[in-house]
Image (cartoon, rainbow, N blue to C red):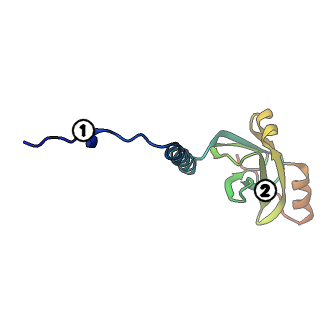
Amino acid sequence: MSVLDPQLLERRRPSNREWVRMALAAVAALVALGALASAFRAPAFVERVTVVNESPFDLHVTVRGEDEGVLGLGTVPRGRSVAYRSVLDQGDTWSFAFDAGGVAGGTVEVARSSLERDSWTVTVPAVVTQRLDRAGVPASARTR
């Protein structure tokens, strides 16, 4: 049977310098975990974005935000509105681009606050119709 040395059982108290090092290591670990968690955060979506097209053209609509990634929404037939569901959030400024028959009709930038105020609805501006008319794009055929 062995006898335990009481000095081996006694714990040494960390010095103030060691406490500071442990605290700094804990803070650094928390910062790293926070950064990692935000990197894996799911993207935000807007429930519904409606595009109102009062022009005589079927318009292909894309949108982009500050990150410069382009998101194709789809085609809005002439004289119609289309509601797009679960649209990837584009941030504080949404830039909508419109084209018909491969001809660019223009881009409109809309502040997020304006979209929210307008119930997430954007109307194709008249200047798009004017540009497409000047470019000689024929009006789209009416659909039922």
Tell me if residue 107 comes above or below residue 38 in the rendering.
below
- Kindly indicate the quadrant of the structure image that contains residue 116: top right
Q: Badge 2: few (under 14), some or many (20 or more) residues near its Cα, within 10 Å? A: many
Q: Which residue is mark 1?
A: 6
Q: Quadrant of residue 10?
A: top left
* Residue of label 2: 97
- Residue drawn 80% across the image and 55% down it: 57
Task: For the residues labelled 1 and 2, say whether their Cβ atoms are less than 8 Å apart.
Answer: no
Task: Look at discs 1 and 2 and give the one toward the viewer.
Answer: 1
- Give percent across and percent down for residue 21: 52, 48
Residue at image coords 78%, 41%: 112
Amino acid type for the residue under numbered disc 2: Ala
Q: Earlier in the sequence, mark 1 or mark 2?
A: 1
Answer with left or right where residue 114 lies relative to residue 4.
right
Q: Residue at x 90, y 50 (%)?
A: 126
What percent of the width, then of the height, locates residue 42? 55, 46
Alpha-carbon span between mark 1 and mark 2? 79 Å
Secondary structure of the residue carrying numbered label 1: helix
